[in-house]
Image (cartoon, rainbow, N blue to C red):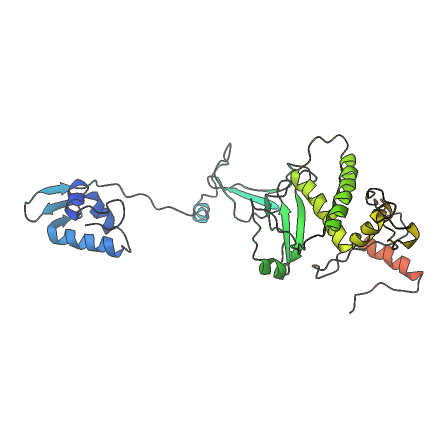
Amino acid sequence: KFDFGKHRDRHFRDVTVEDPSYFFWGRSQSRPSSGLSAYLEWVHRAFVIDMESQTLTCRSSQQVFRGNKAKPSPPTLSNRERLRRLDPNTPQCVECTEFDRSGSNAYVEVRRCLKCGTRTQVKKNPKPKIAFEQCDHKNTDARGSSKTTRKTFCLDCQTFVDEEPQEQFRARGTSSGTGQTPARVVRDAPPLTVTQARAAVDLFTAMARSNLDALGDQDVVQQATVSSWLEDAMDRTIDQDIEATYTACVATVPRASRPSTSESPEMQSLDSGSPPAPPRRLPIVDLEKDPRIFAVLDEGCNRSCHSRRWAERTARALEKFGKTLGPLCG
């Protein structure tokens, strides 16, 4: 009996009589399994085989069973082999439909027609499907990543949404591919005291009002966006130790005896007993006209990334202080 495949639990003779072609198919396999090999050996003992006419003659009854002599299928050629065999004088297609895309990458799509050999190269510049503020960044890939840095690129809003060291990414055991949630920096989530929770709720309320006002006429806000506001409020509560300030605000003690607060708007509003004020908005500056020099330090960067114009402006600014612009040391 067969112990595998579509004929499982059926007798060898029944299958051979009903479908002789199955034997000839098995003979064509270069590496048959142990079960198929046992079946082939049984047929050799029970039948006389004629490979030319594709017939099996039963040794006991002399009955002949004929298989379907299928025409040999043409060999399948790879795209590279098809292009190699093309006649260089083949006229160009009116409309090319079959392509080989070898050489394409995240930035350029290379297409070569398999029928006429015409090669085209198009720079990929897809337009965002969703605005960054409304996108939940679930459809991502890892383009732009290197051996040391892992980047997450959102295919929906066409924006890099995350960057972290490769070691940290591997240690977390997370994969970020198309259709998956992008990698996010994982931080500890310590429990909040009741006082911290109240401070975080008040801060979240003020931040949410400010952010909603900034949206203007926008009608839709993603749940992930609102969740991030709440996470930011809890992070600020923990990182800035708002609990002590908040406790001092609600306590029935003289103002003079309350602890001093920081200069941030959130702390000042908590000190006055009112709901936390929205966070300060940073000023918008013109990098070409502003006399100051702005630079961003990136822990994942392994080389200097600046333009020649920036270097010239920075060198002129440093001359006023007797300094020169050179390679970083340390």
User: Where residue 129 appears, x then y in whole percent?
Assistant: 64, 36
Taking depth in this image into account, of 171 and 124 the one nearest to the observer is: 171
User: Compared with residue 180, is residue 170 higher up or lower down, i.e. above or below?
Assistant: below
Q: Residue at x 84, y 48 (%)?
A: 249
Q: Residue at x 77, y 43 (%)?
A: 202
Taking depth in this image into account, of 195 and 164 the one nearest to the observer is: 195
- Do we see residue 161 in this rendering? yes
Q: Residue furthest left?
A: 61
Quadrant assignment, res 310:
bottom right
Q: Residue furthest bottom?
A: 330
User: Where residue 222 appears, x then y in whole percent?
Assistant: 66, 37
User: Where residue 147 appears, x then y in whole percent?
Assistant: 61, 60
Left or right of residue 65, residue 314 in this image: right
- Do we see residue 287 in this rendering? no
Taking depth in this image into account, of 25 and 138 the one nearest to the observer is: 138
Count of numbered badges drawn on the protein: 0
Q: Residue at x 91, y 50 (%)?
A: 255
Quadrant assignment, res 311:
bottom right
Q: Residue furthest front?
A: 252
Left or right of residue 120, residue 4 in this image: left
User: Compared with residue 291, is residue 209 higher up or lower down, i.e. above or below?
Assistant: above
User: Where residue 317 appears, x then y in whole percent?
Assistant: 90, 57
Left or right of residue 301, residue 24 in this image: left
For the C terminus, give its image quadrant: bottom right
Taking depth in this image into account, of 248 and 59 the one nearest to the observer is: 248
